[in-house]
Image (tube, rainbow, N blue to C red):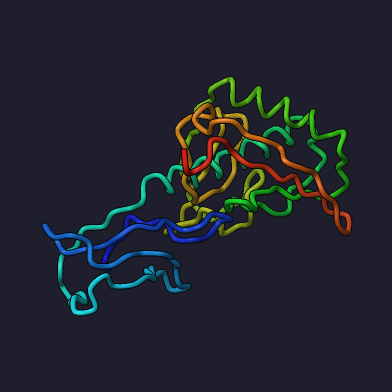
C-alpha cells in the first residue's frame, strides 16, 4: 500500500490490528501484524477472509484499525512514560536501559538495584502524575537526536526529524509510539512488581481496566 494508518510494531509497542477491504465493500483482509522494513516499507501480515478476493495493483482500499486495541496499547505506552517520569523525579541517578509496553509484559528497566520498598514510593508518584491530568505533548525536532530517556538515536526519527513525547513539559523523550491525550486517560497504573537480575532492575506495570472493559 502507498500509505497506511496502521502502527507498525516497534519502540516497545505491538502493532495495530484490524482489517482492509475494497472501497464500499466489507473488509476482505484481516490484519494481525504490521512491521516496517529497513528500507521503509510497511508489511501487513494476516489472512484473506475470502481466498478468491486478493487485491490488485492500483486498487483503492479502506483501512480499519481495531480502536479498542489501539487505545489499550496507547494507554500502556503512556503509562510506561509515566513510570519513567516518576523514576526520573524520584531517582534521577537511575539510567533507563529498556522499555517494554506489550500487554502482560509491560516494564521499565534501569541500571542499578531497586527493592520492594521502592514499590509503594514509585506507585505514589505514578498515582500523582495520573491524577494531575497532565497533557501528552508531541513535537518534532530537526535532525536525528537523543534526549531524555529515548531508546536510542533512531527512536522516533522520521525523514530527518525526531518525534518527541513530553508529559506536561516535565520530560522529553524520542518516541514514535501512540499515546492517549492526557495522563488521566490511562486509567489506573499498577506497579506489579520489582525484580532484579545482573545489576538491572525491572519495574513491571499494568493498566486497568484492561482491553476487555
Q: Quadrant of residue 129?
A: top right
Residue lying furthest top in this view? 132
Classify residue 77 as left or right of residue 45: right
Q: Quadrant of the N terminus?
A: bottom left
Classify residue 26 as left or right of residue 108: left
The image shows residue 191 at horizontal and vertical percentages of: 71, 37
Q: Who is closer to the viewer here, 149 or 53?
A: 53
Q: Who is closer to the viewer here, 72 or 112?
A: 72
The image shows residue 117 at horizontal and vertical percentages of: 87, 33
Q: Quadrant of residue 155?
A: bottom right
Residue lying furthest bottom in this view? 52
Residue lying furthest front in this view? 212
Q: Who is closer to the viewer here, 187 or 159?
A: 187
Classify residue 175 as left or right of residue 199: left
Residue in the image at 48% along x and 41% along y: 179
Q: Reply above or below: 70 against 128.
A: below
Residue in the image at 36% along x and 64% along y: 31
The image shows residue 198 at horizontal and vertical percentages of: 88, 59
Classify residue 139 as left or right of residue 194: left
The image shows residue 28 at horizontal and vertical percentages of: 23, 67
Residue in the image at 62% along x and 29% along y: 170
Counting labels gives 0
Q: Reply above or below: 206 against 196.
A: above
Q: Reply above or below: 20 against 156.
A: below
Amino acid at each position: 500500500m502507498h500509505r497506511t494508518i496502521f502502527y507498525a510494531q516497534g519502540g516497545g509497542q505491538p502493532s495495530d490490528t484490524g482489517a482492509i477491504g475494497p472501497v464500499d465493500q466489507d473488509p476482505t483482509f484481516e490484519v494481525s501484524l504490521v512491521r516496517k522494513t529497513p528500507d521503509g516499507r510497511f508489511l501487513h501480515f494476516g489472512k484473506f477472509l475470502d481466498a478468491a478476493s486478493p487485491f490488485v495493483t492500483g486498487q483503492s482500499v479502506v483501512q480499519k484499525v481495531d480502536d479498542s486495541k489501539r487505545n489499550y496499547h496507547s494507554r500502556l505506552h503512556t503509562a510506561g512514560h509515566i513510570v519513567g517520569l516518576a523514576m526520573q523525579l524520584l531517582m534521577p541517578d537511575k539510567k533507563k536501559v529498556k522499555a517494554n509496553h506489550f500487554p502482560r509484559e509491560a516494564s521499565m528497566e534501569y541500571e542499578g538495584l531497586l527493592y520492594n520498598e521502592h514499590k509503594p514510593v514509585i506507585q505514589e508518584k505514578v498515582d500523582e502524575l495520573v491524577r494531575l491530568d497532565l497533557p501528552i505533548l508531541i513535537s518534532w525536532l530537526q535532525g536525528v537526536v537523543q534526549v531524555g530517556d529515548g531508546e536510542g538515536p533512531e527512536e522516533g526519527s522520521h525523514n530527518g526529524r525526531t518525534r518527541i513525547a513530553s508529559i506536561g513539559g516535565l520530560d522529553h523523550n524520542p518516541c514514535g509510539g501512540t499515546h492517549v491525550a492526557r495522563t488521566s486517560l490511562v486509567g489506573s497504573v499498577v506497579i506489579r512488581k520489582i525484580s532484579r537480575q545482573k545489576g538491572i532492575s525491572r519495574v513491571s506495570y499494568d493498566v486497568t481496566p484492561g482491553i476487555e472493559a
